[in-house]
Amino acid sequence: MRNWAGAVVLVGMLLSPAVSWAQDSRQVRGRVTEAGTGQALAAAQIAVTGTRLGAITDAEGRYVIRGVTGSSVVLRVVRLGYQPTTRTVSLTTDDVVADVELQAAVKTLDAVVTTATGEQSRKSYGNVVATVRADSLAEKASATNVNELLQGRIAGVQIVQGAGQTGTSSSIRIRGTSSLSLSNEPLIIVDGVRLDNSPAAGNYSTQRINNFSGINPEEIESVDILKGPSASALYGTAAANGVLVIKTKRGRTGAPVWNVSGEMGQVRQPATFFDNYRSWGRNVVNGTPATAAVLCRISDKSLGRCLQDSITTFNPLSNPQTTPFATQPRGQLGVNVSGGTDALKYYFGVERLEETGPYRMPDAEIARLTALRGTAPTAKQIEPNQLAQTSLRGNFSFPLGKTADLSVSSSYYDRSLLSPFDGGFFAGLSFQAFFAPGTRGVYNGNSAQHTGDIFSVEQSRRDQRFTGSTQMNWKPVSWLSNRAVVGIDQLAAYSYRFARANEGTVTGWGPPGQTGGKDATRSSFSRYSVDLGSTASFTLSPTISSKTSAGVQWFKDTQYETVVQGYTLPPGAQTPNSASIRTSSEFTSENATYGAFVQQDLAWNDRLFVTGSVRTDQNSAFGRNVGNTLYPRAAVSYVLSEEPWFPQASALSNLRFRLAWGQAGVQPGTIAALQFLTANTVPLGGTEVGALRLGAIGNSDLRPEVTTETEVGFDAALLASRVNVEATYFKKVSKDALFQNPLPPSYGAGANQWQNIAAVQNAGFELSVDAQLLTRQWLTWSTRVNGSLIRNKLVDAGNAQLAVTQGARNVVGYPTFGLWARPIKSFNDANGDGILTESEIVVGDTAEYRGPTLPVREAGWSNTIGFFNNSLQVSTLLDYRGGFYNQWGFENQRCISGNCRAVSDPSAPLADQAAAVTTTSARLGNSVWGYFAKNDFIRFRELSVSYTLPTTWASRIKAKRTTVALVGRNLGLVWTKYPGIDPESNGSVNNTGGGNNDYFSAPLLQYWTLRVNLGY
């Protein structure tokens, strides 16, 4: 890592003289603006055709191209969202001004997308490729992570939320869930380097944290989404779930451009929590009420088992004196500079982020602990959810002679996260608050632990990550281009859970009582990437052109992990070394992939494109009997509207049909195929001695999961390219899906064996409609509607012994992780007392399917309205999910514990009573059918109001451009069918598997931020 850092510093030292390097005196400069409004267009690409000269416009739309020769040149100007144009410029002087106007277009087929073989035009690619311009979104949408840039904006892409805590991670699902046991996350590539997106090692927070969470969205320029194997086949093993290709911001020719951004805002927990109930009464013994107060469920009251005296309610999460929630601050400050010459272009950026999650120890608890300990609780105990991150980025590019160039990308972040003690622990915050009796009691409304003691369990994590890549492009002759990319992604992490002696919860994790303890994990992960490729381009005839690409790749992952545990600490101790009870362990994982590919592209009249390719992979996780795996791909793209006979009408200005087929895979776990021994102790001669036993029998025939996808669709531009439609049908089938099949005990080698058994299918439709509804100088309005319909099912399970427990289950012919239980067939209040008992409820004899846990339907609707030459913009985003169910585990467990309304209040709805009685009745199979709740919702995801100050105002603070934006995120539910607290609370979110259960998952957080952007 030190060598990489040294390289960045060296390039920085060289920057100053390079910027002032003398260039050819002849230059072309100008400004690119939007036709009709005159608005400056940043990030427009201007290229001098037939040369390697070009530039990118700055924030004011200005560009400069130096070193231009000849009597005239042809400029080609391209920007996402606008129709490309060309302009011939005569070089009559040494300083030529060429201003360009671009017509707004929702999308263009001439845009460039990034694929495994390099950049190519969208129209030549046989798949739908979604692109998100993160650089423009981040300035006004104020996203807290990269996933929020994708949320609700891409058809077929679902961001599955987890817990409402600062620093936790959501999950990305593209076109459904394909694997039962392996990761369903997409492959992520940043500047040519494969980025690790695995769950954080040693995550003690009990909430989902992925290694992708720390990537700074402010550094990203664009994200291309390849949605499935028909598009991602050349990425091979690890690409079955799609690919995110991320480009970070680069330098551009011209004087240094400084950008300063600052955010200040707040984060809060907006949920309305349910009251805890307690039905008080006295047992009836031989017809006589007893004297002791007991819990008297209304079903027992109806049966005459107890007399109900009263009902009490209390809500420890909402009561002002006991609530652990508070509105907390979020702040962010960033500075970046970009510029350069034809000799060296550069981009430097630095950012500091600090956010305090919406948790705070109640004042009463602070006073209690201060009196008990003699000192006040620590700052980390009072505010147990804190995030701080420093991010650095340096990108450079420069020519190597006339035929080659070199690009260097480097980033580093230092991230510290403090998380509250929660999740699935009995002593955690959620369990204690949700399953408490309906009285304040000695624990201030909790079940058996004080909130101050819960917050005194410190859970901390620190990540230090460096990602770097070097890419060399070499074009020795006009028809041959070569590239070489070498990169590394390194992550060093240290995480722990810790409680001092005489502090923390009485029970709940490792230490016996409040004796103090510490669990700690120190891990180091490295991913190495090497990618070599060449492309040869030929014109075979006046109408046919050819492009042949070939390449080889090598990737290696290494992870080293040390875990220590120490319980019963002496006063003042903070390390496991001083504990009375100590354990430790080590873990090492290494995995390598070798791959090669070849691709042939043919184009006829630049409107009919045919592609065929194949990739071969070998991975160290494959069984020893498994050879290379092949991943073929074929695609056709036909731009019908460019045929000379196609009607030239503004009503339909572009029409393209596309068809693609391909395969990609996901490799097994690192040691899934291996036979290995494990250490243990056995009694011998009255003492315990070390021994080895067979830990796993392995599987020498273990293969990767291979997903085959077919995609067909069309793109149409309507009304002079002001409306764009993308429609796609896809079907993908994952075969050889891995499953841990139970082994007979006689094997004596572990309980399970990894086997290629199952097959999973996902099929559906995707639709995106973009429209520029109004384009006036004083008013503009653009809108986007996107959505998908996805059907998922388990096609085959071979000889797998599938679980038959109620809840999320896998059954052939039904969606994976669908909800199953014995159904409540009917209920009837036979005696008319308004209360249901077991005998008044009819439950089916066998489990039945209720519904899927992954949305069948999803959609997003975004609008941007601009006023007064777009100086004032209002943007909104609505996010819809439908056709799925939540297991509603919180309410189920509350009713089992006896503190929900349905078991306490005689006026509770009969349907709620039926669910509560059924889940607690062994005679009715303890069925949870009544808690399978419809989960459809529409959420007001984003609101942004931004204003670009007049130039004269900005100049008063020496700025060229100033923008102020007020941004709100997760503003509320517009509509929902979910009866629980938040339809997006999901404790089942993970890279692998599936399910949808709000159990131990806090509701989503709400953000309001005020952002200022200054350009110099």
Image (spheres, grey):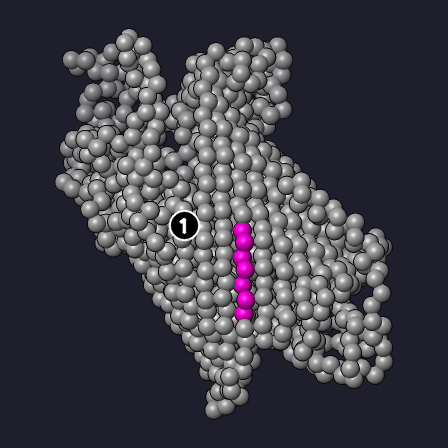
| Residue farthest toward the top in the current orientation of the protein | 686
Spot occupied by residue 234 in the image (x, y as percentages of width and height)? 45, 62
In percent of the image, x 38 and y 23: which residue is there? Answer: 437
In percent of the image, x 54 and y 10: which residue is there? Answer: 570
Give the dominant element type of the magenta stretch: helix, strand or loop: strand
Spot occupied by residue 740 in the image (x, y as percentages of width and height)? 28, 41
Mark 1, other Cα within 10 Å: few <14 / some 14–19 / many ≥20: many
79 to the left or right of 176? right
- Report whether residue 256 is seen: yes
131 to the left or right of 806? right
Question: Looking at the picture, which amino acid does disc 1 mark?
Answer: Asn
Spot occupied by residue 478 in the image (x, y as percentages of width and height)? 62, 76
381 to the left or right of 809? right
- Report whether residue 647 is seen: no
989 vs 383, nearest the viewer:
989
255 vs 552, nearest the viewer:
552
Label 1, on which residue?
A: 619
- SS for callout 1: strand
Spot occupied by residue 144 in the image (x, y as percentages of width and height)? 58, 46
In percent of the image, x 57 and y 14: which residue is there? Answer: 573
Q: Tell me where residue 338 sits by quadrant.
A: bottom right
Q: Which residues are magenta?
A: 529-535
